[in-house]
Image (tube, rainbow, N blue to C red):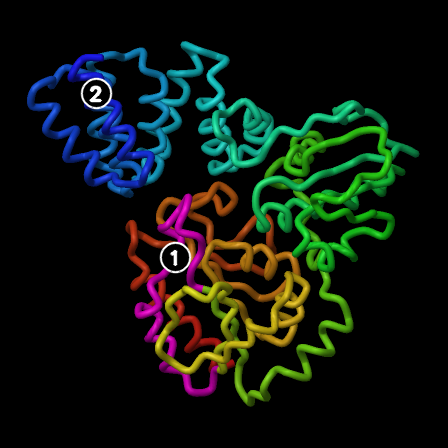
Amino acid sequence: MGEFELILCKGAALHDRGCYRDALLLYDDALIRWPNEAALWNNRGNSFLEEGLFEQAADSYWHALNLVPSLHDSRIALATALQAMGDIEGAYIECRKVLDSDPSHAEAHWNYSLLLLLRGDYEAGFREYEWRWKKRKFSSPLREFAKPHWSGENPEDKTILVYAEQGFGDTIQFSRYLPMFEKMGAKIVFECHQPLISLMDKVGKGIKLIAFGNKLPDFDYHIPLISLPHLFGSKLGTIPVDVPYLFPPKERLLFWKSVTPACSGLRVGLCWAGKGYPDPHRSCEPELLMPLAAFPDICWYSLQMGNNVRKPSFDLIDLTMLVNDFADTAALMGQLDLIITIDTAVAHLAGALGKKTWLLVPFAPDWRWGLGRMDCPWYPTMRLFRQERSNDWRTVVFQLVTELSSLAKE
C-alpha cells in the first residue's frame, strides 16, 4: 500500500470514529500534494457533510465530480448537501443525473424519493421509497418470512402481519393506515416497539398487537408499515387525515389528571431537543427559549425525555419521571391546551391525538413537513413555524412569542 492509499485509510478511520475535523486537516494537507485526486475531495466532502458545513461539502463534491464525473456516490452526496442548503431543485437535478446513468443506483432512488415527497409528489415519492431496502446501511433490516409479501391482493378473510420500521414517530404517523385493512375485511397483526403497545391498543378494533421480540402468530401475508401509502395509492390529497386516530387509555388519563398541578391559565407542553444523530439541526438550544418566560399566565410542562438534556432556565413543570411509555405521554398531553415541539416523536404523537400543536421546523425540513406551507398535510391540528435561515431559531421563537401573545388575549 502506497503513501496516498495510507492517507485515505487513515482519513476514513478518523471519519468513522467521528473525528471529522482531524480528518479534514489530513485531507487538506494531502490535497496540497495530490490536488487532482477525486477520492480526497470526495472524502473531504463527506467529513464536511457530517460537520453540518454544507457549502464546504458541496464545494468538495464539485471538485471531485469535475475530476471524475462518473462518481455517482459523490453526486448523491452533493444532492444531500444542496438539499440541506435549501437548493431543492439542484438536489433533484443531481439525483436525476445519476438515475439517468444508472437506473439501479439505490442511494439515488432513496434521495430522489425524499425529494419527491418533500415536493408533495406522494404517489411517485412513495413508489421510489420502496428502494430503501436496497440502500446501504438502511436504518431498518429487511425482514424475511416464509409467507408472501402483500402486494395489494384482496385481503378479505386473510391475516396480514404489518410490522413497524424505523423510529417511534414513523410508527405513530403511519399507523393511521391500519384501519384501512379492516374496511377490506382483513385481520391485522401489528408488530411494533414495546413502548407503543398500550398507545396502539385503540388504533383499530380487530388489530392484534405484538411487541418486537415476541413470537408471531400465523399469518397469510406480511408488509412493512411504511409501504402502505404506496400500496394504497396515497397522494397529497388522499392520505387519511381523520384525527384523533390514537387515544390514551382512560385509566392513564385519570392518573395524569390527578398528578397534574392546577393552573388558571394556559397549559403548554414544550419539547425542544431531539436525537443528535442523524439530524442535530432539529434541536433548539434551551437558552433561546427564554422569551417564552414572558407569559406569567402560562404554565409550562416539559415533554422532553432524557436525563442528559439541558433545560430552559424558567419555571417548567417536569413530570416526565412518571412517564413509562407513549400512552403516559399521550395522557399527559391530554391535560394540556397546546403542544410546542421540535421535529420528534412528540410532534407525531400530538398530531395523532388531534392536539393543537405548534411545530418548530428547521431550514432543511424533513420530507413530511413539505416546503413553504404553514399547515401540515398529515396532521390537521398542527401549525408549522419554519426557520428562514439555517440554525436561526431566534426568529422562530420570536414568532412563537407573537402568536402566544395573541392566544393569551383570546
Give the residue displayed 26% in from the left and 38% down from the top.
54
Q: Quadrant of residue 22?
A: top left
Q: In the rendered image, which residue does mark 1 sit on?
A: 283
Give amino acid for label 1. Ser
Q: Check the image and name the residue furthest to the right.
A: 157
Residue 164 on image: x %, y %: 66, 41
From the viewer's perspective, is residue 303 above or below residue 259?
Answer: above
Name the disc covering residue 6, or none. 2
The residue closer to the viewer here, 316 or 34, is 34
Residue 375 placement, left or right of 192: left
Q: Residue furthest left?
A: 32
Q: Nearer the viewer, mark 2 or mark 1?
A: 2
Foreground pick, 39 / 15: 15
Stretch of the chain drawn in magenta: 272-298
Q: Residue at x 79, y 46 (%)?
A: 179
Is the residue 182 above or below the residue 274 in the image? above
As drawn, 20 above or below 149: below
Which of 326 and 203 lies nearest the eye of the viewer?
A: 326
Q: Furthest-front residue in view?
A: 1
Residue 288: % across, % down: 31, 68
Q: Which residue is more in the foreground, 328 or 65?
A: 328
Mark-to-mark CA distance, 2 and 1: 37 Å
- Whole-percent x and y of residue 203? 76, 53
Within 10 Å of disc 2 (Cα), the crowding (few <14, some 14-19, many 20+) is few
Residue kind at label 2, given as amino acid type: Leu
Residue at the spot x=22%, y=12% of the render?
1
